[in-house]
Image (cartoon, rainbow, N blue to C red):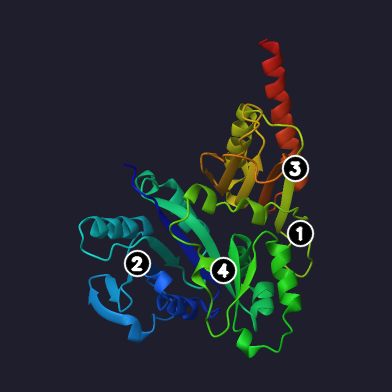
């Protein structure tokens, strides 16, 4: 019997944006039990002291039955160690992992580690990337700090924190967040309170469908040209009405990884593959790394167009469209010549 994959979510956000407050609240919720928390060694603050029960080496047992550990050397080593402890019965049989990054951390290397370690891939599946944003200082932070814009750009969920300290004037901030990442729903946390299912999703969900959440991020995404923020980071969607041949899709993704990897923050898409018209392919990539396509059992709607969402730095929609068209045309010519 196949081993059930354990979802790994990433909780990121700039300094002081409320990550630990939200996490401390979630750890007290019954539905968030059996969770392993991984924080880096330079976290802003420790988890609330009353949550800590005992300590053994780098793994802390929490009163909720959850675990907490720090990344001592390498993230993948930490995750392998957690899995070994779980297999040996030396710790709580957690069914979910949440990685809390430091406020100045770039989340991309974490996503890389989760997607490229083949041993971890047999046990873990990438869950949601959740980014917290301070409703009071968030707009100024986005203007001044490039890393905060990147944290927002790669998110699957954005959480506005500290709303209890505002007077309801965060419309401009919401507009900035939508411009940076129009595909990510924005949730609200008051005094750190938020429902875990809305944030990370239930650990029992089928990872093949849960991770991608097709309906939420496939809406038309206008190119971001907001002059008040990082004009290098753009969100845009490439749409194709005609089916794409499987080999053309493969060559297209390989070309993106080779030539644009460092600037391709995230890519998600649903593709009408010519060889499988009834079962769309879902693609997902972070910089140089792409998951193998996941095949849905059916189309989520009557719309059969291919839609690929890009969140990238210094990458134009026109260049991507020309690349895809050129590869598709070349593949079509070769196929015609072989007939």
Label 1: which residue?
224
Q: Earlier in the sequence, mark 1 or mark 2?
A: 2
Q: Earlier in the sequence, mark 2 or mark 4?
A: 2
Measure the C-alpha gap from mark 1 to mark 2.
Answer: 40 Å
The image quarter containing residue 37 is bottom left
- Placement of 300 over or under 244, stated as above or below: below
Which of the image's four quarters has the C terminus? top right
Counting from the top left corner in percent of width and height, residue 102 is at: 47, 71
Which of the image's four quarters has the N terminus? top left
Mark 2 neighbour class, 10 Å CA radius: few under 14, some 14 to 19, many 20 or more: some
Which of the two marks, 2 or 4, is nearer to us in this view? 2
Kindly identify the residue that appears in the image at 63 percent across and 84 percent down.
163
Badge 1 element:
loop
Counting from the top left corner in percent of width and height, residue 245 is at: 65, 28
The image quarter containing residue 87 is bottom left
Mark 4 neighbour class, 10 Å CA radius: few under 14, some 14 to 19, many 20 or more: many
Badge 3 element:
strand
Measure the C-alpha gap from mark 2 to mark 4.
Answer: 22 Å
Measure the C-alpha gap from mark 1 to mark 3.
Answer: 16 Å
Badge 4 element:
strand
Task: Say the numbered circle drawn on residue 239.
Answer: 3
Label 2: which residue?
34
Looking at the image, which is closer to me, 246 or 231?
246
Does residue 123 show up? yes
Kindly identify the residue that appears in the image at 65 percent across and 41 percent down.
299
Measure the C-alpha gap from mark 4 to mark 3.
Answer: 27 Å
Q: Earlier in the sequence, mark 1 or mark 3?
A: 1
Measure the C-alpha gap from mark 2 to mark 3.
Answer: 41 Å
Looking at the image, which is closer to me, 63 or 156?
63
Mark 1 neighbour class, 10 Å CA radius: few under 14, some 14 to 19, many 20 or more: many
Looking at the image, which is closer to me, 194 or 153?
194
């Amino acid at each position: 019997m196949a081993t059930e994959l354990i979802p790994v979510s990433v909780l990121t956000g700039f300094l002081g944006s409320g990550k630990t407050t939200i996490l401390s609240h979630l750890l007290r919720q019954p539905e968030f039990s059996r969770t392993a928390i991984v924080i880096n060694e330079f976290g802003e603050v420790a988890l609330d002291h009353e949550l800590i029960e005992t300590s053994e080496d780098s793994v802390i047992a929490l009163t909720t039955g959850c675990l907490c550990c720090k990344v001592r050397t390498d993230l993948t080593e930490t995750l392998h160690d957690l899995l070994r402890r779980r297999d040996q019965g030396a710790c709580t049989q957690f069914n979910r992992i949440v990685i809390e990054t430091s406020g100045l951390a770039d989340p991309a290397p974490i996503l890389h580690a989760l997607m490229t370690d083949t041993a971890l891939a047999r046990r873990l599946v990438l869950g949601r990337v959740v980014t917290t944003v301070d409703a009071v200082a968030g707009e100024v932070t986005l203007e001044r700090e490039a890393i905060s814009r990147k944290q927002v750009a790669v998110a699957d969920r954005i959480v506005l924190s500290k709303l209890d300290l505002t007077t309801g004037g965060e419309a401009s901030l919401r507009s900035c967040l939508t411009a940076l990442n129009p595909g990510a729903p924005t949730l609200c946390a008051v005094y750190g309170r938020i429902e875990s299912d809305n944030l990370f999703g239930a650990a029992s969900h089928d990872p093949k469908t849960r991770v991608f959440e097709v309906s939420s991020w496939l809406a038309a995404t206008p190119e971001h040209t907001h002059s008040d923020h990082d004009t290098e980071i753009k969100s845009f969607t490439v749409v194709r009405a005609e089916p794409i041949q499987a080999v053309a899709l493969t060559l297209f993704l390989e070309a993106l990884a080779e030539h644009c990897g460092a600037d391709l923050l995230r890519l998600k898409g649903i593709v009408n593959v010519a060889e499988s018209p009834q079962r769309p392919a879902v693609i997902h990539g972070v910089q140089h790394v792409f998951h193998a396509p996941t095949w849905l059992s059916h189309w989520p709607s009557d719309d059969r167009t291919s839609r690929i969402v890009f969140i990238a730095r210094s990458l134009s929609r026109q260049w991507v469209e020309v690349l895809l068209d050129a590869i598709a045309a070349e593949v079509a010519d070769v196929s015609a010549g072989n007939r």
